[in-house]
Image: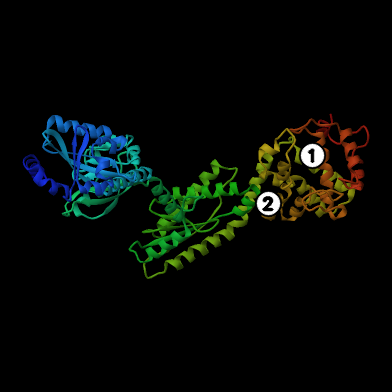
Amino acid sequence: MLERLREFQRELGEKEKKYYSLVDNAAETIIVVQNGVVSFANQAVLAHTGYTAEELLSRSFLDFIHPEDKESAVQHYRVLLEKKSPLYACSFRIFTRDGSVKWVETNSVVIEWEGQAATLHFLTDITPRKILEEELQRLMAEKSLILDSLTEMVAFLDRDMHVIWANRTAGQSAGRSPESLFGAKCHEIWPGKNVPCPGCPVVQSMETGQVYAGEVTSPDGRILRITATPVKDKKGKIIGAVEAALDISERKRYEEQLKFLSMHDSLTGLYKRAFFQEELRRLSGSREYPITILVADLDGLKLVNDTLGHAKGDKLLQACAGVLKTSLRRSDIIARIGGDEFSALLSKTDEKIGVDLNRRIRANVEAYNQEHPELPLHLSLGAATCRSAAESLEETFKKADNLMYRNKLLNGAGARNQIVGELLAALKEKDFITAGHAERLQELCWKTGEKMGLSPRQMADLALLAQVHDLGKVAIPDSVLFKKEPLTGEELEVIRQHPEKGYRIALSSPDLTGVADLILMHHERWDGKGYPRGIKGEAIPVECRILAIVDAFDAMTSERPYRKPITREEALAELKRGAGSQFDPRLVEVFLSLFPEGKETSKGHSHHAH
């Protein structure tokens, strides 16, 4: 191009007229500017711009240049004239005759035109190229915007692993601005890190020329999923890589949690039945023989759930799991295989070791119960040993299960009785009314029963009912039992559940089964407005009707958390008012006859009459 311009310069200078026609008809767009005015424009210029020769010649060249580009065009013209550079290029926008705008690139040279200095310009239409460049810039801006909005960390690395571009997430991850990462090696963005991570996907990708993915742990403990893509030049040579990293720490923790929960019981932390059975199958083909299988059942769980609530039952289950884990070896597989049933696989364990472990479990249960007498553990155990692969582990499990049930049959009733006894002891500890409440009730019930001529069986049931009728209150929170303010509707409903809870407890004990129905109905009213069944009149057992009167009398004459006691005379008057509605009227008369005017029933009672 430079030689061509020089050739034009010589030809125009020496043989201007001879070659004028040649220039005018050249395919290139040629224009001459002298003193800022268009002095010559060939036919290609006219065709390119749409102007006539008259419209172009003798007009300022700046008239045709876009206002935003005039300053750079003037500067270009000045440099040409001052430095007389042999070739100088720049680009700007021009207006065509129809008002449209075109981008042109000019390669310019200083010439002599009609005896004076001028500038000759070869104009090239670069409008399509400029449109493409602008589109590329827009796409790159959008790409950067997209890359910056990604939750993934994205960085472009050169062959030596220097960061040449990074998105906003990458900067945030390192606690720096993206620009501050440029020039550093990718592993150096972490404090104290001066070598790539072991198995670095970026290194692997640039070594193999393949897309490579892997997980690495960052110096601050995060788990990053990295995908590295090699970047190659036109000849296929690897010149760098694109690294995309995603922080998957939370996902990993969640996956680990899901994995744990899929195999473990969420309440006790022990393995689930499915895992236990899988281990049973695995061990059947192993060299871990002899294998002992232990089966344990938590006695009385249903009773505790029904009476004290499932929260208490859950505590028992957790305590049972704790005792088993403490008693057995860390290598043993312990699982909760049912609601109240546990099992353990003890590899390389013969009968003797199995017996020792059984004894250790019993000792740990006893130690636990001494520390937690309010809610003790009662376990039925069974164990069986499989000596070799010739025997079936499934059959061994059945043997252990059968032995556990045999143990449960022997101890079950006793365990339930013991639990009921402990609940009664807990109720006595909760004697929130006054000392001797049950004894006073028993005495007055007995006297009333005698006056009514009850049978010996009825008298015995009445005496027992006086002692255990409030057994269901062991399941009521102290915050409700001891509350001094009036109870809410929800709290009243909790209180009203105690006859049913007491009924279920009583059914669990052979000693209390006979009075279970009486416990259930001891809050029924003569008029049918009692609970839980709403029966009335003589459909209510006479023992319950007697207890209702005696219990109300003792409650009124004893101090309660929510009120002071009233006098005996006031209490008797209240019973009269309740006769025929709350109480059996005939029984009220019998009860009143126990208190001749001016006489006390007992020394113990006179204390509460005033």
Which residue occupies the extreme bottom position in the image? 390
In the displayed structure, does residue 362 sit left or right of residue 278? right
Residue 99 spot, x, y in % from top left: 34, 44
Q: Which mark is residue 505?
A: 2
Mark 2, Cα crowd under 10 Å, few <14 / some 14-19 / many 20+, is many
Residue type at mark 2?
Ile
Residue 196 in view, yes or no: no
Between label 2 and label 1, give the one nearer the viewer: 2
Residue 440 badge:
1
The location of residue 75, given as percent across then percent down, is 21, 31
Count every numbered label the image shows and give the total.
Answer: 2
Q: Earlier in the sequence, mark 2 or mark 1?
A: 1
Task: Please state which of residues 208 and 85 is positioned toward the viewer in this rendering.
Answer: 85
Q: Residue at x 77, y 45 (%)?
A: 466
Q: Amino acid at mark 1?
A: Arg
Residue 382 in view in this figure: yes
Residue at 23% x, 55% y: name it. 210
Q: Residue at x 41, y 51 (%)?
A: 255
Locate the C terminus by quadrant: top right
Image coordinates of residue 171 in percent, x first then y, are 32, 38
Secondary structure, mark 2, is helix
**How far from the left and from the top, in percent, is residue 448?**
86, 45
